[in-house]
Image (cartoon, rainbow, N blue to C red):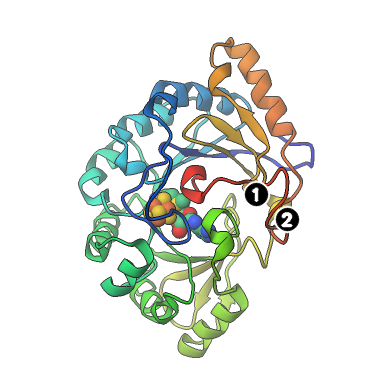
Amino acid sequence: MIDSFGRTIDYVRVSVTDRCDLRCFYCMPENGIKQIPHSEILRFEEIVRIVRLLAKLGIKKVRLTGGEPLVRKGLPSLVREIKNIDGIEKVHLTTNGMLLTENLPSLVEAGLDGINISLDSLSEETFEKITHRSGVNKVLRSVDAALSYPELRVKINCVPSEINRNEIIPLTRHFLQNNRLSLRFIEMMPIGLGKECTGIPEAELAQILQSEFGELSNLPNEVGGGPSRYYKLGNLPGRVGFISAVSHAFCSECDRIRLTASGFLKTCLQYDTGEQLRPLLELSDEDLLEVLRQTILNKPERHCFSSKNGSGLEQHIMSQIGG
Ligand code: SAM
Ligand code: SF4
């Protein structure tokens, strides 16, 4: 549907859990996290019902995220059910890759269209500094396993910061050898723990990449490609992408809403505006559809990442939102 600022909203990111098996320093504290009780997390049938109604409003693309979506059991069956909804064209997954290899066959069989795998380092030492867990080889095996399915779109997400500055070149050299891969650098966002973290801005990153690999040359934006801008880099076969919510705000083209694990329909990453749907699930489909329509209509015009505190701003951490 079209929101009140003329934007077409056709994409929902569904967080299926707030739990995670890693503790990335910019996303989740190592200890002391207050988890949402299981009884307050949307059941799969509730998610499917909400997505079915959203599809009536024009949502076509669904991304399953978390926390770590693969720590929730039975995810392939959710993929299958969402893919079967009239109007839903694509279902994608964003994962840290730790549990992906073993889940891939059933996810692909269920109809998954694409996977974004988050990885900030090729070195185990830096991986552990960032995630407070071990497992870089597991994630690398997952990337290879995903690439063994020619029908899957595979992208790598990396959040550059001072901790993995030395990893930018090795990651780029490694992943851009493959012409099926895009490596996307996500600018650190001042949400949750990210408010206290310093990332590497796009302009500086572009300089680092160009001095090692040669010119960045603009690629045409994909239709429905979202906020990433893609480039060829020197002679490397793969593509590099930048998602720079801070230095290149993309609010005027924002096409998305978010559904949190506890059932909050969130209309902007930065603001806490939206609607808590769980108490409204008793409504008829017709009435719930109207709530969804009104909530999307009230989507804010733009974020304001320069003001990090204030009323109405999101106070949750990223693992509770889904990225
Ligand atoms: N656990 C899965 C994963 O890591 O891919 C899915 C959820 S995670 C919240 C989704 C994405 O958000 C990841 O690519 C992660 O790097 C990114 N992210 C988390 N906190 C961030 C922050 N403060 N700024 C920018 N990106 C962030
Ligand atoms: Fe977990 Fe993903 Fe957050 Fe890292 S970014 S702590 S993997 S939810």
How many numbered marks, from 0 up? Answer: 2
Q: Is residue 20 left or right of residue 239?
A: left
Helix, strand or loop for disc 1: loop
Displayed quadrant of residue 283: top right
Q: Tell me if 203 is positioned left or right of 140 in this view.
A: right
Under mark 2, the amino acid is: Cys
* Picture quadrant of residue 237: bottom left
Q: Position of residue 294 (x, y in %)?
A: 72, 26
Q: Residue furthest left?
A: 102
Earlier along the polypeptide chain: callout 2 or callout 1? 1
Describe the element under mark 2 as helix, strand or loop: loop
Q: Answer with left or right where residue 89 lies relative to residue 228.
A: left
Foreground of the two, 190 or 201 = 190
Taking the spot 74% from the left edge, 34% from the top edge, the residue there is 298
Q: Are marks 2 and 1 in contact (CB under 8 Å)?
A: yes
Check the image and report above or below for 249 versus 152: below
Name the residue that disc number 2 marks: 304
Label 2 – label 1 distance at C-alpha:
7 Å
Q: Position of residue 267 (x, y in %)?
A: 65, 39
Question: Which quadrant is home to the N terminus?
Answer: top right
Residue 270 marker: 1
